[in-house]
């Protein structure tokens, strides 16, 4: 498939997923997000991850803020990205979910934070869709593909609502998969 066809198919899929995600009933979403946080916490405990990179949820993404707060209370090192221009991420130490500021493209990141440059145990990725091989469809900026490539030793987990799991998603040669996806079959 040609690169422009792949991009077109990705953009169509992105619009469908965003529309579906925005339509989730708030109570169902809250229950599902809580389940995701519980499952992710069990994984973090089982593998004893200490340095965890995670997104700060925006709009209708799976809300992992309660999990982040719990991990901070337990002394885990939480790193969150600041989205910069030209497909770059700056990785900042998060010390409180109360000390967050708005960034570009609707993102949020730690305010008044120090940059983290080091190894990561776990990367929790944002995403719009995941196939059953771990391939990820992001928002289209290409930010995470380079970041995931740079941290090949870190375990990578995607979080998804059931409709975000697919048999196949359109792929480019630069797309980097995650190691696992936490999701249920039904909401």
Image (cartoon, rainbow, N blue to C red):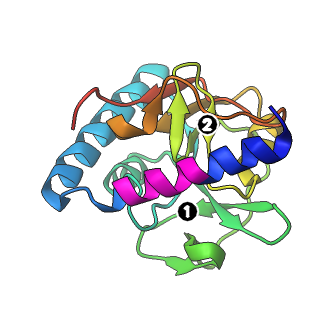
Task: Point out residue 87 in the picture as x, y percentages from the top left corner.
Answer: 81, 61
Q: In this image, 185 relative to 62: left or right?
A: left
Q: Residue at x 13, y 56 (%)?
A: 27
Q: Which residue is mark 1?
A: 94
Judge by depth and name the residue closer to the eye, 10 or 67. Answer: 10
**Mark 2 → mark 1, Cα distance in angstroms:** 25 Å
Nearer mark to the viewer, of 2 and 1: 2
Q: Which residue is mark 2?
A: 136
Q: Residues within 10 Å of mark 1 (few under 14, many from 20)?
A: many
Residue 127 place in picture, x, y as percent: 54, 46
- Is 1 in the magenta? no
Vertical position of residue 37 compared to residue 49: above or below: below
Instruction: Evaluate whether residue 159 shows in this view.
Output: yes
How many numbered dots are placed on residues in this image? 2
The magenta segment is 12-20
Q: Is residue 77 left or right of residue 30?
A: right
Dot 2 or dot 1: first in sequence order is 1
Is residue 182 toward the left or the right of residue 157 in the image? left
Q: Identify the residue shown where x is 70% and y is 50%.
A: 8
Q: Secondary structure at mark 1?
A: strand
């Amino acid at each position: 498939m040609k690169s422009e066809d792949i991009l077109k198919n990705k953009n169509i899929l992105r619009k469908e997923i965003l529309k579906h995600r925005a339509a989730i009933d708030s109570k169902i979403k809250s229950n599902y997000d809580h389940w995701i946080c519980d499952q992710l916490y069990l994984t973090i405990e089982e593998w004893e991850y200490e340095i965890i990179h995670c997104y700060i949820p925006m709009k209708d993404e799976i809300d992992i803020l309660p999990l982040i707060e719990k991990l901070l209370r337990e002394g885990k090192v939480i790193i969150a990205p600041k989205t910069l221009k030209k497909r770059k991420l700056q990785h900042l130490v998060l010390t409180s979910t109360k000390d967050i500021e708005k960034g570009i493209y609707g993102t949020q990141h730690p305010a008044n934070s120090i940059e983290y440059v080091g190894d990561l145990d776990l990367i929790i990725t944002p995403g719009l869709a995941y196939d059953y091989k771990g391939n990820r469809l992001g928002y289209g900026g290409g930010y995470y593909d380079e970041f995931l490539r740079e941290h090949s030793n870190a375990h990578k987990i995607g979080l998804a609502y059931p409709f975000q799991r697919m048999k196949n998603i359109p792929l480019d040669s630069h797309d980097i998969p995650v190691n696992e996806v936490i999701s249920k079959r039904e909401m």
